[in-house]
Each structure stands twice: as C-alpha cells, then as structure tokens.
Image (cartoon, grey):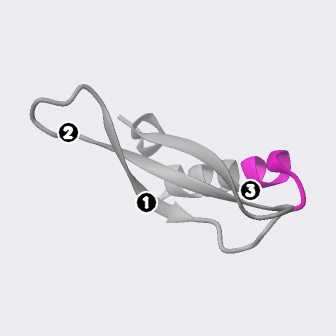
Amino acid sequence: MTASGRLALSVSELEEGEFHYVLLEAVTIPGELLCFRPKEFGERGHRSPMDAWFSGLGAVRRLDKS
C-alpha cells in the first residue's frame, strides 16, 4: 500500500484568513474502527482553503515518491 493510501488531508483555518493543511496518518488502535494522528502540518499559511489543500496534495505526492 502506498503512503497516500493511509493518509487523510485536512485544511484548518488557524488564524482568520490563514489556512494550513494537515496530513493525518491512519493508525490501528485496538477496539477503534479508524483513527488518525497528525503526520505533517503545513507551516506556510494560504489565503484560501483550496490553496492549502493543493499544497497538502503536493506533500502527499512527495511522500509517495520517497
């Protein structure tokens, strides 16, 4: 399974008008159906949620290549 098969991408507005992506990695916890833990945070703020999402998509692609 590729790295992206175990990841979820989320976008958060940490400050008003400043959006960051968060990569979440699936983890297995006994008794739980599906859990995620933060793997990587986008340090650069973006003006729109879509810009942050595309930045996060680039991070997923970089992880897939490594």
Quadrant in the rendering for residue 38 = bottom left
Q: Is residue 49 above or below residue 15?
A: above
Which residue corresponds to the image point at 74% horizontal and 73% vertical from the top-left? 44
Does the magenta segment cover residue 53? yes
Contact (Cβ within 8 Å) of mark 2 with mark 1: no
Residue highlighted by disc 2: 28
Q: Say which label, 3 or 1, has the lower sequence index.
A: 1
Say which quarter of the image contains residue 2.
top left
Vertical position of residue 48 compared to residue 29: above or below:
below
* 61 lies above or below 8: below
Which one is nearer the viewer's eye here, 6 or 63?
6
Q: Is residue 64 left or right of residue 3?
A: right
Real-space CA distance between mark 3 and mark 1, rounded to the nearest whole angstrom: 15 Å
Looking at the image, residue 22 sits to the left or right of residue 44; the answer is: left
Residue 41: x percent and y percent? 56, 65
Q: Position of residue 54 (x, y in %)?
A: 77, 48
Question: Of discs 2 and 3, which sits in the foreground?
Answer: 2
Q: Secondary structure at mark 2?
A: loop
Query: What amino acid does circle 2 point to?
Result: Thr
Q: Which residues are magenta?
A: 47-54
Give the residue at the far top of this rendering. Answer: 33
In the picture of the structure, the residue carrying the numbered disc 1 is 39
Residue that numbered label 3 is attached to: 55
Q: Quadrant of the N terminus?
A: top left
Q: Amino acid at mark 1?
A: Lys
Q: Residues within 10 Å of mark 3 (few under 14, many from 20)?
A: some
Q: Residue at x 87, y 61 (%)?
A: 17
- Label 3 sits on a secondary structure element that is helix
Residue 4, x across and y down, in percent: 48, 41
Which amino acid type is marked by label 3? Ser
Work out how far the residue at label 2 is from the one at label 3, CA to CA, in angstroms: 27 Å
Image coordinates of residue 23 in percent, x first then y, are 52, 53
